[in-house]
Image (cartoon, rainbow, N blue to C red):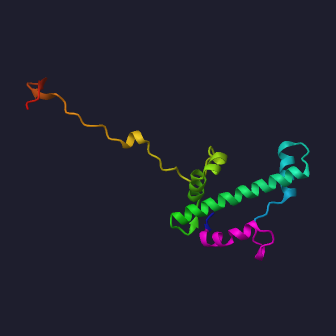
Amino acid sequence: MKVGVVWAATNLMNMTQNGSEGGRHLHFDVDDMKQRLVDGTGKRVPNDVANYFSGVVQQLTIEVVKSAIGAAIEAGQREVTPRHVLLGVKLDEDLNKVFGSGVFSGGGVIPNINNALLMKPPRTASPLRVTHADDSTKLEPEEA
């Protein structure tokens, strides 16, 4: 699913406020979260736990969307793709701690080349020169 960056950037602040115009605000139903927690654990869940959990999920979602929008704008594109979500999460230190071991479908990989592969080994002149004569290999000292 692709989301337009312009729409997301203009409505991101509205998503954090309750009762934004047009009904476009980010809302995680506390009762639904409580029911999911009960179904997942099979135990009773107090209301304040569901309320806190709903707030945490809402805040994480807002942070991921902000970082994905930033990555899309930095790339000069008008749509947020799974690649932008991956880049936004991996390049943000706090989100990388939370989602670091996760796999993003369609996100690709982070461009990273090991420094040992980038460095060229120093060229040293060999004191011996290899010559081939009569199907045998001879090592002779180089002439100056």
Identity of the residue drawn at 89% across and 52% down: 48
Q: Is residue 52 magenta?
A: no
Q: Quadrant of the N terminus?
A: bottom right
Q: Nearer the viewer, residue 72 or 63?
A: 63
Q: Quadrant of residue 65?
A: bottom right
Above or below residue 77? Residue 127 is above
x and y, in percent, of residue 102 in the image: 63, 46
Res 136 seen here:
no
Res 52 seen here:
yes
136 vs 21, left or right, is: left
Q: Quadrant of residue 84?
A: bottom right
71 vs 65, left or right, is: left
Identity of the residue drawn at 56% across and 64% down: 72
Question: Would you say the magenta stretch is mainly helix, strand or loop?
Answer: helix
Q: Quadrant of the C terminus?
A: top left
Q: Is residue 15 magenta?
A: yes
46 vs 122, left or right, is: right
Identity of the residue drawn at 11% across and 24% down: 140
Residue at the limit of the structure toward the bottom, as seen here: 22
Identity of the residue drawn at 65% across and 69% down: 8
x and y, in percent, of residue 11 in the image: 69, 71
| Residue stretch rendered in magenta on the structure | 4-25
Q: How many marks?
A: 0
x and y, in percent, of residue 54 in the image: 81, 55
Q: Nearer the viewer, residue 22 or 13?
A: 13
